[in-house]
Image (cartoon, grey):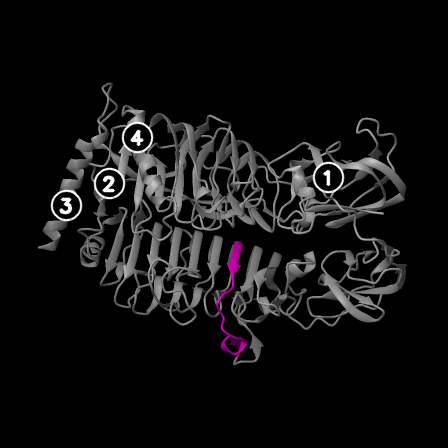
């Protein structure tokens, strides 16, 4: 009986698709047809002959209802048939916007298609769960704004202008954004991340890329930005080793719906459609079971799958009484409009047999009220089968434990099959929303990988109670990793690994028996909100010759005093524990390579240590890099024979010192095994004499060239939460000028760029004037080497002071506060 029902549904789908999708006609299509297709009322299929005002009304109305609806149960998809549309609209939560052309340029939005963060005053760190795919955008103002964080993928886009990846707050300060994903896309002009903390880009191209904050990874990109990690924080991999692009829905030349399934490709660079059609094959819509939330059950879907059907989820919430079982090779499971699956009775939501070529894309799976062993499982148990020629691939998958509704699970995603490819995953144990609590929305691990040769691009994995990622299979590769460890650990005793002997659970754990593993661009972040908790190492990997990690960073976002990430990898690397100084907030490690044997060889001795007083309370140190048989991972700085700090670079600023006091320093190099070099030569410097407090800046004003949304007044407002910036990369002749409104005597200027530590001037000249027009010669020139730049000179008496940039850098020149001293 069920077989007959499915067949009837399929026949009806074919008939409806033929009648609902017609070749282009000259008469205008009524807007009422937009959501009267085979995909149900939550999908709007727009035709270029429909009145632009009617389309604008629908898109604007949906955005109005979903702009700030972070945990809404509503779901929408806007699908645009080939053609040009004069529209300007924004994309809110749980909304997918896609072109129905074979290629992105078949659909053009002429005017604007943007994602803003106005609902949270420019803060885009919660702009999740939406997507834009397979179309072109011609922005009327020249710039498309897509201010997003996790689970907001951008694919197959052609942006005919600039692309901003952030939004401004009400005072025109760049609001934070926290990670996104761009693939198979072209941006004709500049990409400006600005305050984006991390980002992953794959197989794309642009006119230019402007800056970076903490962790940005580029794989298979034709023109990645230049720079050396950690400043700027770029990780570049020349080619994408193996990828299958995400399947997508389109309309063929006969006006019929098809799902295009891109081919597996190896060693690629650039977009798949730049010089013609993306390689692959089309599957007719009649080969799909079209699931609707109001009518489709797990039993219906499993029956269709067992008969060889593919599965297409339309927007909505699907409550599952049973696991959806994918048993046939090459099955395509595609979601449109952010469909969300919830296992109500503690079962796994989707399981995939250990078969070739399954594709799962565009789904969100929420844990249900009864604990599930996993939410998505690929393969069952240990597997010896190779799928290298036709691997299973996962695209744009979100797995959530809590947030939208209370839920529990042991593991988010378990990969048992070999050769699986994953492309943009967010596995999230909710830190806010419904059910968020240490014991109420428990999730032990976000990801467990048991299969061999698994490759993941863009892995976001956060807040789980134990290891965020546990990798047991050999040959694994990860390109970009972003992970916040749990906020809500109640106390240290509740969060101890290795039978209670080690503080915390590493975010990224590669099992001790693994002999080959490689990862690029890993960022682990802490905000221990509820207790002074410590994590011994953010990353734990075996010391095997085949284990290599490239570019890792830890960040202390905020937290209870006394909390920290003590090390980056395997008890190596400095701790992060506060927002200031800069080294307390961010630590980096450029390379880790396992040796397979105990490394007992110490690094060479650092040479040419110099010390120079920077102010009455700080001394700057510089030295020549040491070498090591495996690799130097950092340096320990000793003041008077006592450890004063650590750094991963060959410079260090020692602060909070006493004025007019001599200090002696040595430096030792350290490797991944903890071996220390001999001490460097000693270097001594005396801090500058103490002086009166900074001049009173009441009534002072400032101007700058250029001027951005970070206004010059921020230089003098007394707030360390604001900053002035040029709004563009550093180039010579940029400047700011301070008018003290009366002649003052001064001999020192201090420019504080902390918080965005790479924004200090690479070179500068300081001028003074009594009339603001005649400046004469520079009273001092110099170059910055860290976030606080101090320039001293002979006593000057003047009303105006001007600082001119003489260097170049991809970072913006920005300063929190400027102070003058007499």
* 320 to the left or right of 360: left
Asked if residue 194 is positioned above or below residue 46 in the image, the reply reads: below
Quadrant in the picture for residue 110: top left
Residue 446 is marked as none
Verify whether residue 771 appears in magenta: no
Give the residue at mark 2: 285
Circle 2 or circle 4, nearest the eye: 4
Q: Nearer the viewer, residue 92 or 40?
A: 92
Q: Residue at x 53, y 56 (%)?
A: 481
Foreground tag (4 vs 3)? 4
Direction from residue 246 to residue 304 in the image, left or right: left
Pick whichever of labels 2 and 4 is earlier in the sequence. Answer: 4
What residue would you read off at disc 4?
Answer: 55
Q: Which residue is mark 1?
A: 700
Dot 4 falls on a residue whose secondary structure is: helix
**Residue 292 in the image: above or below residue 547:** above
Q: Earlier in the sequence, mark 3 or mark 1?
A: 3
> What's the distance in space between the residues labelled 4 and 1, CA to CA?
51 Å
Give the SS element for disc 3.
helix
Cα–Cα gap, marks 3 and 1: 75 Å
Bounds of the magenta span? 479-498
Front residue (pair 146, 176): 176
């Amino acid at each position: 009986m069920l077989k007959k029902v499915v067949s009837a549904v399929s026949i009806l789908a074919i008939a409806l698709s033929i009648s609902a999708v017609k070749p282009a006609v000259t008469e205008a299509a009524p807007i009422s047809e937009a959501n009267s297709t085979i995909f149900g009322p939550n999908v709007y299929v727009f035709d270029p002959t429909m009145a632009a005002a009617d389309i604008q009304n629908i898109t604007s109305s949906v955005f109005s209802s979903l702009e700030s609806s972070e945990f809404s149960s509503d779901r929408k998809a806007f699908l645009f048939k080939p053609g040009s549309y004069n529209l300007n609209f924004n994309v809110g939560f749980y909304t997918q916007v896609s072109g129905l052309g074979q290629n992105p340029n078949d659909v053009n939005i002429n005017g604007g298609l943007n994602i803003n963060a106005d609902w949270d005053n420019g803060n885009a760190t919660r702009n999740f769960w939406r997507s834009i795919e397979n179309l072109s955008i011609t922005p009327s103002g020249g710039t498309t704004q897509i201010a997003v964080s996790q689970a907001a993928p951008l694919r197959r886009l052609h942006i005919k202008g600039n692309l901003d990846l952030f939004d401004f707050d009400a005072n025109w300060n760049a609001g934070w954004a926290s990670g996104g994903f761009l693939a198979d896309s072209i941006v004709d002009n500049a990409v400006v991340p600005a305050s984006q903390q991390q980002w992953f880009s794959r197989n794309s191209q642009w006119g230019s890329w402007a800056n970076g904050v903490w962790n940005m990874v580029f794989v298979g990109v034709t023109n990645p930005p230049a720079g050396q990690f950690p400043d700027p924080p770029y990780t570049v991999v020349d080619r994408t080793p193996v990828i299958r692009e995400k399947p997508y829905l389109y309309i063929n030349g006969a006006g019929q719906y098809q799902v295009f399934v891109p081919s597996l490709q190896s060693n690629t660079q650039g977009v798949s459609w730049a010089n013609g059609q993306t390689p692959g094959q089309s599957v007719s819509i009649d080969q799909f079971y079209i699931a609707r939330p109001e009518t489709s059950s797990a039993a219906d879907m499993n029956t269709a799958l067992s008969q060889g059907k593919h599965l297409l989820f339309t927007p909505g919430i699907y409550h599952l009484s049973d696991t959806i079982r994918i048993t046939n090779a090459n099955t395509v499971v595609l979601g449109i409009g952010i469909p969300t699956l919830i296992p109500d009775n503690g079962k796994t939501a989707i399981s995939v047999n250990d078969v070739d070529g399954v594709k799962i894309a565009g789904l969100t799976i929420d844990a249900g009220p009864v604990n599930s062993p996993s939410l998505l499982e690929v393969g069952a148990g240990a597997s010896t089968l190779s799928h290298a020629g036709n691997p299973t691939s996962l695209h744009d998958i979100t797995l959530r434990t809590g947030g939208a509704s209370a839920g529990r699970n042991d593991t988010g995603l378990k990969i048992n099959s070999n050769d699986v490819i994953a492309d943009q995953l967010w596995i999230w144990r909710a830190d806010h929303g419904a059910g968020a609590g240490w014991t109420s929305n428990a999730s032990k691990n976000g990801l467990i990988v048991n299969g061999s040769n698994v490759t993941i691009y863009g892995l976001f994995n956060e807040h789980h109670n134990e290891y965020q990622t546990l990798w047991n299979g050999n040959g694994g590769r990860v390109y970009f990793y972003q992970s916040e460890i749990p906020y809500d650990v109640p106390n240290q005793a509740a969060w101890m690994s290795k039978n209670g002997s080690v503080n915390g659970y590493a975010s990224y754990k590669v099992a001790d028996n693994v002999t080959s593993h490689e990862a690029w661009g890993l960022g682990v972040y802490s905000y221990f909100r509820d207790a002074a908790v410590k994590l011994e190492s953010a990353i734990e990997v075996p010391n095997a010759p085949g284990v290599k990690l490239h570019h890792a960073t830890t960040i202390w976002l905020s937290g209870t005093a006394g909390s920290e990430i003590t090390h980056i990898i395997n008890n190596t690397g400095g701790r992060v524990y506060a927002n200031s100084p800069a080294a307390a907030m961010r630590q980096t490690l450029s390379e880790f390579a396992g040796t397979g044997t105990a490394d007992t060889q110490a690094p060479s001795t650092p040479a040419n240590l110099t010390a120079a007083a920077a102010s009455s309370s700080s001394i700057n140190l510089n030295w020549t890099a040491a070498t090591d048989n495996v690799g130097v991972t950092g340096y320990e700085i000793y003041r008077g024979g006592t450890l004063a700090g650590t750094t991963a670079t060959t410079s260090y600023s020692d602060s909070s010192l006493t004025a007019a006091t001599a200090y002696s320093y040595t430096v030792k190099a350290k490797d991944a095994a903890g071996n220390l070099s001999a001490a460097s030569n000693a270097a001594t410097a005396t801090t500058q004499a103490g002086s009166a407090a900074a001049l009173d800046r009441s009534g002072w004003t400032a101007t700058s060239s250029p001027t951005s949304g970070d206004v010059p007044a921020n230089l003098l407002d007394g707030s360390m939460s604001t900053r002035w910036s040029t709004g563009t990369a550093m180039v010579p002749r940029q400047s700011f000028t301070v008018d003290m409104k009366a002649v003052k005597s001064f001999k020192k200027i201090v420019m504080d760029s902390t918080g965005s530590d790479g924004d200090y001037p690479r070179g500068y000249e300081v001028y003074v004037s009594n009339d603001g027009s005649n400046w004469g010669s520079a009273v001092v020139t110099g170059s910055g080497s860290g976030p606080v730049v101090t320039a001293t000179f002979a006593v000057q008496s003047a009303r105006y002071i001007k600082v001119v940039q003489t260097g170049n850098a991809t970072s913006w020149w920005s300063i929190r506060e400027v102070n003058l001293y007499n």
